Image: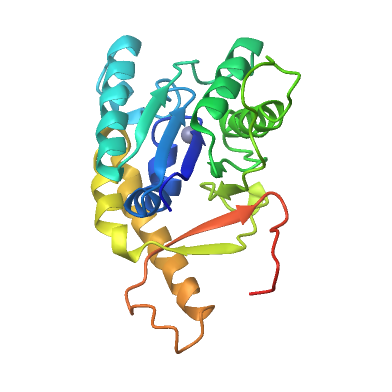
Amino acid sequence: MAGDALLVVSAHVGDFVWRAGGAIALHSRRGFDVHVLCLAYGERGESARYWRDGMTLEAGTGARHREAMAAAEVLGATLHTFDAGDYPLLETQELLDRVVKLYRSVMPSIVLTHTERDPWNGDHETAHTIATRARIIAQAPGYDPGHDVLGSPPVFLFEPHQTEHSGFMPDVLLDITEVWERKLEAMRCMEGQQHLWDYYTDVAKRRGSQAKRNSGPNLGLPSETMGEAYQRLYPQVATELA
Ligand SMILES: [Zn+2]
């Protein structure tokens, strides 16, 4: 699959690890050029431990940057940080333009981002809006003309922290067993959110169990299957049903 690229649009630095670390490691291993965009660091809203330890905003941002760099390296991804600020993350014209530019530079064949709804975290909703809006703009020949335009890469929404109230209905279960150790190592880079390490290990076990249940008894999934759940935003295009 050399030549294909995967782009992950993440609101904060932890999000891409918990929700899509397996997909990132898997596609990197398959030869995809994998890029992770963190719109913000999550320095205000997703760095609880640092604030409890009396850290300043500046020091917290630096710590989260180092965590994200380490996690991206473990997963085999190139990290882009736009430092747009969190709580709240705001959709500005400048930020949108930067994301469009990144789309046209990476030319992803697959896009991963947040769900449209997340009543617990408005930044995730904003990141969804920016990711999907920028994708559409990047397709328009009339926007910043003279550059190659984006095609129509499928968008997969990754799992929010509170699934039901975010309207998340998974229709893809990804077997991440072969890269599980990498995801675990990347999660452990997120020292500001240690309370989530066990939580997302449990989520991976549960999604793995559901993957086994939906793959039939003879497809050979390992007994300790680990999984990630996704929901397609747009219809799948196919020439046959499989
Ligand atoms: Zn987040």
**In the drawing, does residue 161 fall left or right of residue 68?**
right
Estimate the x, y position of residue 53 in percent, counting from the top left: 24, 22
Estimate the x, y position of residue 32 in percent, counting from the top left: 40, 46
Estimate the x, y position of residue 157 in percent, counting from the top left: 59, 47
- Residue closest to the eye, 79 or 64: 79
**In the drawing, does residue 234 fall left or right of residue 170?**
right
Q: Residue at x 42, y 69 (%)?
A: 208
- Residue closest to the eye, 152 or 193: 152
Q: Residue 88: in sight, yes or no?
A: no
Examine the rendered structure and indicate whether residue 46 appears above or below residue 88.
below
The colouring scheme, among rainbow, by chain, secondary structure or one colour, is rainbow
- Residue closest to the eye, 204 or 119: 204
Q: Residue at x 45, y 47 (%)?
A: 19
Q: Residue 222: in sight, yes or no?
A: yes
**In the drawing, does residue 137 fall left or right of residue 198?**
right
Examine the rendered structure and indicate whether residue 74 appears above or below residue 140.
below
How many marks do you count on the picture?
Answer: 0
- Residue lying at the far bottom in this picture: please name it: 218
- Residue closest to the eye, 179 or 141: 141
Quadrant hosting residue 242? bottom right
**In the drawing, does residue 29 fall left or right of residue 218?**
left
Quadrant hosting residue 205? bottom left
Quadrant hosting residue 181? bottom left
Estimate the x, y position of residue 3 in percent, counting from the top left: 44, 44
Examine the rendered structure and indicate whether residue 96 appears above or below residue 219.
above
Q: Residue at x 70, y 59 (%)?
A: 237
